[in-house]
Image (cartoon, rainbow, N blue to C red):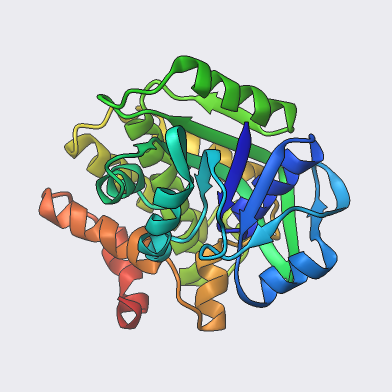
Amino acid sequence: MNYLIAGTGGVGGSIAAFLALAGKDVACIARGEHLAAIRTHGLRLHSDLKGEHTLHIPACTAEEYTGKADVIFVCVKGYSVDSITDLIRRAAKPDTVVIPILNVYGTGPRIQSLVPGVTVLDGCIYIVGFVSGKGEITQMGRIFRLVYGAHRGTQVSRERLEAVKHDLEESGIKADLSDDIDRDTFVKWSFISAMAVTGAYYDVPMGEVQKPGQVRDTFIGLSRESAELGRKLGIDIPDNLVEYNLMVMDKLDPHSTASMQKDLARGHESEVQGLLFDLIDAAEAHGVDIPTYRLVAQKFTHHS
């Protein structure tokens, strides 16, 4: 199968690099100086799991891409989803599957509504990956886990789903085929929201969240409140979601920070809407008390 990675940032670049290292057929969508560097020098990977590599992967802008893909991984930020719907329409064949890997909840159904003739799944990822320079991706730590699956009512061949899993695992990516992707993407949203918001609120790396104290207590409070929202939404939230979030947190590289935190620090556009304010709006709409979220949101109101 051939793979198209829409968005070659920390997540998309890591997926592309790992697939390419395993000899898979992969192309990347990027833009600007990052794209120019990939075209000129190759995609440079600094990886705790794979080491140092320079990979010459075909790369172009969304507008320049003229091929067809068997699998499209959507790895753009939530605020850029609308910009790649035309690419999906052009790149999709009748049996193409689209797998969004975003930090915000509800992305699969959102993209499906924009490209109704294409099979859109949903997914989430656990990784510390970021753009560390023009044409350079850094993957930190030992966690690289991708979860994906079809929503109820979405028809997709089991063989295609298993083939993707096989290719990912051959590439060194832990792949889980979800039996309840609505639950799994919400659980990821709960974690990444608590992680990114806590890190950005205190302006600290994850090592500070791993220590007992006020910073960790904030992460716990945010996790507890989002879990309550999930239950109100009728999602099959695990009883131990707070403990699960803490377990994932404690496995992260202590020097790592969330991409939202990096973007806010640089004054760039960030996912603060999808990771903070969208969750608050959903909680308020469903009568869920969220004192920790309300407290931390005060720092970011000018970003909403």
Q: Measured along the vertical axis of the image, is residue 302 above or below residue 203?
A: below
Q: Measured along the vertical axis of the image, is residue 108 above or below residue 193?
A: above
Q: Quadrant of residue 157?
A: top left
Q: Is residue 65 visible?
A: yes
Which residue is rendered at x = 53% and y = 45% of the image? 73
User: Viewer-proximal residue, 192 or 269?
Assistant: 269
Which residue is rendered at x = 35% and y = 62% of the image? 82
The percent position of residue 158, horizontal first and vertical second, equals: 46, 16
Q: Residue furthest front?
A: 66
The percent position of residue 120, horizontal first and vertical second, equals: 37, 38
Which residue is rendered at x = 56% and y = 37% of the image? 247
> On the rendered structure, is 196 left or right of 266?
left
Q: Quadrant of residue 299?
A: bottom left
The percent position of residue 88, horizontal first and vertical second, equals: 43, 50
Number of labelled discs? 0
Q: Is residue 203 visible?
A: no
